[in-house]
Structures are given as structure tokens and as C-alpha cells.
Image: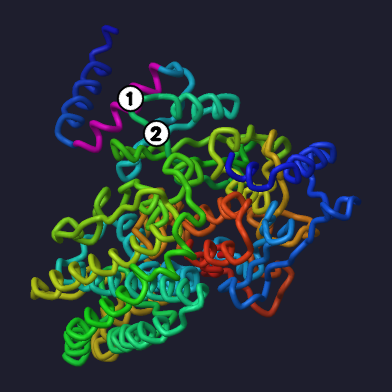
Amino acid sequence: MAVNDTLGGTHKIIQEAREQQGGQLVPTLNDFSQELTTLNLGPTHPATHGIFQNILQMDGERIISGVPTIGYIHRAFEKIAERRPFYQITPLTDRMNYCSSPINNMGWHMTVEKLLGVTVPKRAQYMRVIMMELARIADHLICNSILGVDTGAFTGFLYVFQEREKIYEIYEEVCGSRLTTNMGRVGGMERDFSPVALQKLRDWLKTFPAVMKEFESMFNRNRIFMDRVVNVGPITAEKALNYGFTGPNLRAAGVDYDVRVMNPYSSYEDFEFDIPVGTNGDTYDRFIVRNEEIWQSLRIIKQALENLPEGPFHADAPHYYLPPKQAVYKNMEALIYHFKIIMGEIEAPVGEVYHSVEGGNGELGFYLISDGGRTPYRLHFRRPCFIYYQAYSEMVVGTSLSDAIVILSSMNVIAGELDA
Amino acid sequence: MADPTKEESTAAQETAAALDPAAQRNAQVLALLHRLFGEATFTDVQEPYGLLTVTTKREHIHNIVAGLQRDEELKLHFLTTMCGINYPENLNQELGMIYHLHSLVHNVRLRIKIFFPVADPVVPTLTDLYATANWMERETYDFFGIIFTGHPNLRRILNVEDMGYHPMRRQYPLEDGTREDKTDLFFGR
């Protein structure tokens, strides 16, 4: 093992001492030359991108072991969801991976639609695809530019954050909010794209590629950046699968698993795009895979926008899709449906459904068990961060502290999703 | 074997399987499960929304997941997720575990359920097979109080250590049950 070689005898001594103590961590050894330092990385450390703690045992600059503590912003979403009607759960999903809220929203809507057996019109599906891919770009931009910041390159971050701001302006035009979007509804979108939204989207599609090219030219072959990230925190494909990796982190390890292709939802089968894969799953590969995914997302958005079908933007199913507010005042049926939907009295079938979407950082799954009541009997979120962050404590062993920071930001761990 | 209704239903199933690729794959998975672990191991085979769901006993769960991990025919090698569930009204089967397996090669999914009494919430761990099971099991322990025997570090993960109860069990309502100013007779459970 490379780790053992680097650490030589020290590692062996610590290993033995640890085994004697039944696998527990040894705070310090009495021998001064082999003293270990305990370092609290987090919970509120600017480089941890959220509230989570790692207690690191350091031998000088080397990390001997890391013990993560999570749950600092646990908000019991699964429990809360058991008491909320379906449409009230959408805001909970916003607050999981808050860097790409629309994907979570759409994923949840699609889960409920699957349960209710609703077909969403093509236009709404394409609109969803556009918003989801915008969200993916925003998510990857944050992750990659922050990775740049953690290696000491602040400029790229500022460049692309301007573009992210424009994406948020498009969100705002489409749904009225920016970060926690609560976008769309069960059955489609809540309103059609306005001319302003379409104009903003078209303008952004024109300006963004140049910025992205500039960002890439700043990093992709940058000697200093590469020295910091190449071969840092590699993970093999087998190990990544065993750890339940999905999304860009798994693809960086060389496995071409993408939910959009394997189980297409929302008309993803209509679009042509590639799945970028890496080779050895290190930080550099994760970075490059995300960059390439941004280009692929752009391709999808362009295709969806060009071929955006005419037609309704929501399913024609008044018993669960809220009627327009004007109709509620004039029309008896609309008033009844409005009341029933708001009070959560829609008829839901008894059943269980698992639906997953390709989230910003992996397979985001919703496992919904309905007993026919107004709320889910049980709702379980498969949160990609929560699952792959377990590998972190193994990935940092033998690396230095600065590498640990870089690995953490390249894994795109979002505290909101981690803790649910 | 001479039962005509049974033959008919099998024939109907076969035609349905031939028409629908998802059903075909599910039939293939079920056949594999029956071949590897015996037909009696599985009860209550269903396909809600196209996802094959089988129920088994907790004694078999480790064996089944390990066997599927070794299996090279369908390669159900990916543990997508697992979660606990609580049905207080099912006597002696109050608690349950639900596992989702996925074959990334053949794109088939399988859901395995086990149920056991709340008085004896002990399940073998899967951490020796899947590293990813570690935190999933800790989360389930945290939420439902299910004990995973053989787990290397079975502590709470999202809630505080001294919480004293397992909040996702149905006996703990989300709101204070003693509250009188806000009855929820009509819309609550």
C-alpha cells in the first residue's frame, strides 16, 4: 500500500496501537517523536462548504484517519413529509441539494405523477428538461469554481458566479424565486415560459459558452492547478460502486452510469448528448467530468429550446393540478378542486413507487409509500451525498490537510442534502 | 400441475412478459432468485409500477444479497438504498427493512423487504458486502431503532446521541399529541 510506504514505521505503530484499543483512535502516543495531533476540521470552517465536522488525526502534515460527524443541519424531512400533502413536500426537496433545487423539485413531481399515473404533456417535459439542465450547470459551476478557490484561484469563481447569477435570474422569471425554487407542480409547470424568460435564456446561451471556455482555459491545463489535483483522492471503479457512488463522482471513476440515459424520464430519450467519463476517479477527473457535463447540458438545453413543442404546459387533470386563480372566483368546479387540492384531499392510489433522477451530484431517488391517505405513509430520499460522503474518511487517509480540503470540494458534498 | 387455472395464469404471464420488456426482465430476476435461493424463500411477489418486489425472512437477507453480489448473470451489484419502515398494526411484523438493488449492466432493479417484530428488531448487517451500507444502517438505526448485528460502528448519525428514542416510529407523532388548541380530526391521520 502506498500509504504504508509513505508513513513507514509510524503508521505501523499507530496501527498496532489502534488494534490494541479495539480499533479505537489513539489520541497521542507517549513517544514524543511519534505524537499525533488531533485536528477539528469544521463544523464551521470556511473550506468545508457547509456544516460538517471531521476529526482528523494528523501525523505532521499527513492524515492518519478522519472521523466525520454529520447531522448538524438535520431537519427530519422524512418525518415532516409524513404529515404533508404531496404538493407541500416540494419545498422540502428544495432544501436538500440547494445548489440545484429545480432537479429535486421535478424529481419529486415525477414521483407523484408516477404514483398517480399521470402523463405530462411534451411541452412541460421539455420545459422541465431545460430547467433541470440549467440547474445542473449552476450546480457544477459552484462545485468546480469553489474547487478553484480551494486551490487558490479565486478569479474563475468570480467569472462563473456571474453566469450563475444569470441562471438564477432565469429561474426567477420562470417561477418567481431563486435559490429554493419550489418550481413546477405535480402535473406540469405552474406557468408557461414568459417571453422575458425565453429572451433571457437565449441571451444567456449566447454569452455563456465564451465564459465557460475562458474558465476552462484558466484551469484545465494549468500547471499549478494540475499539481494540486491530479492523483489527489483517486478511487477505483469497484470501490466507488461498493460505496454507492453515483453521478459525476462515479463517472470520473470510469463507470458510465447516468440515470438520464439508463432510465430516461421527462423525454431525455429525445436528446442527443454524451456521458463524459474519467479514468482514475481523482479530483482532476471529477473536475473535468463536471466541466464536460456543463457542455453536454448546454447541448441538451439548445435541443430542447429549438424543438420546444407547442401545447399545454401542464396535464389536463383538474383533480390534482391547481386551477388558475381567476377561474376559482368564477367557476364552481375550479373552486371545488382548488379547495380539495389545497386541503390535500386528492385521491391517491395505494402503492409504492421508486423514482430517481440524475441530480447535480448523483442519483437522487424518491421512495414513496402511499396508503391512500392525503400524505405519504413513508417517504425515503436516496440522497447521493449522504451515500458517497462515507468514502471521504477513507479517501483522505495518507493525504495532507490541503489535499483533504480539495477532495472534499471536488466531491460536491452539499450539507443540506447530506443531513436532510 | 393439472390445475387449468394455474396453467392459464402462467400462460397469461408469459404473454405479458413477452410483450413488456420490463416484465420480461422481472420474470428473469424472479427465476434467478428462485433458482439460487429456492421458491419457498420468497413470499408476496409483486411488481408495483414495474419494480419487482419480493418479501423474505430476515434470516435469508444477508445470504440473498451476498448471493446476488456473487451472481454474474444479472449482476445485481449495486445497493441503491435501504430504509426502514414501521407498520404498528401488523402484529409481530411491526418493523421492516426495504432494500433496493440495481444492476447497472442490465438495468434491472429489485426491491427486497423483510419484516420482524418490534420487540426483536435485529437484522444482520450488510456492511461486510457493501461499504455503502454503513451509514444507511446507522441512519435506519437512528430513525427506527433497528439493530444491525455485526455493524462496526452502530451509533446515531443524524440525531443527537442522547435522543433516547427513535423518531421515525409511528408512535411518535410529528406534533405534540397533548395539544388541545389545534385538533386535527378532519385532515390528520
Q: In which quarter of the image is the N terminus of chain A?
A: top right
- Image x and y of residue B6, in percent: 27, 17
Q: Which residue is drawn at 40% across and 31% down?
A: B45
Q: Quadrant of the C terminus of chain A?
A: bottom right
Circle 1 marks a residue in which chain?
Answer: B
Q: Name the residue under label 2.
A: B76
State the mark number for residue A122: none
Q: What element carries label 1?
A: loop
- Image x and y of residue A233, in percent: 51, 55
Q: What element carries label 2?
A: loop
Q: Which of B115 and A345 lies nearest the eye of the viewer?
A: B115
Single out the residue that lies furthest toward the top: B2
Q: Mark 1 points at which residue?
A: B73
Magenta-drawn segment: B21-35
Q: Residue at x 14, y 75 (%)?
A: A305
Q: Which residue is drawn at 38% across and 50% down?
A: A353
- Image x and y of residue A89, in percent: 46, 69
* Number of marks in picture: 2
- Tell me if residue B55 comes above or below residue A74 in the rendering: above
Residue A380 appears left or right of B117: left
- Tell me if residue A151 comes above or below residue A13 in the rendering: below
Q: Can residue A68 be seen in this view?
A: yes
- Tell me if residue B21 comes above or below residue B177 in the rendering: above
- Tell me if residue B84 comes above or below residue A163 in the rendering: above
Q: Which residue is drawn at 58% across and 69% down?
A: B185
Scheme of colours in the image = rainbow
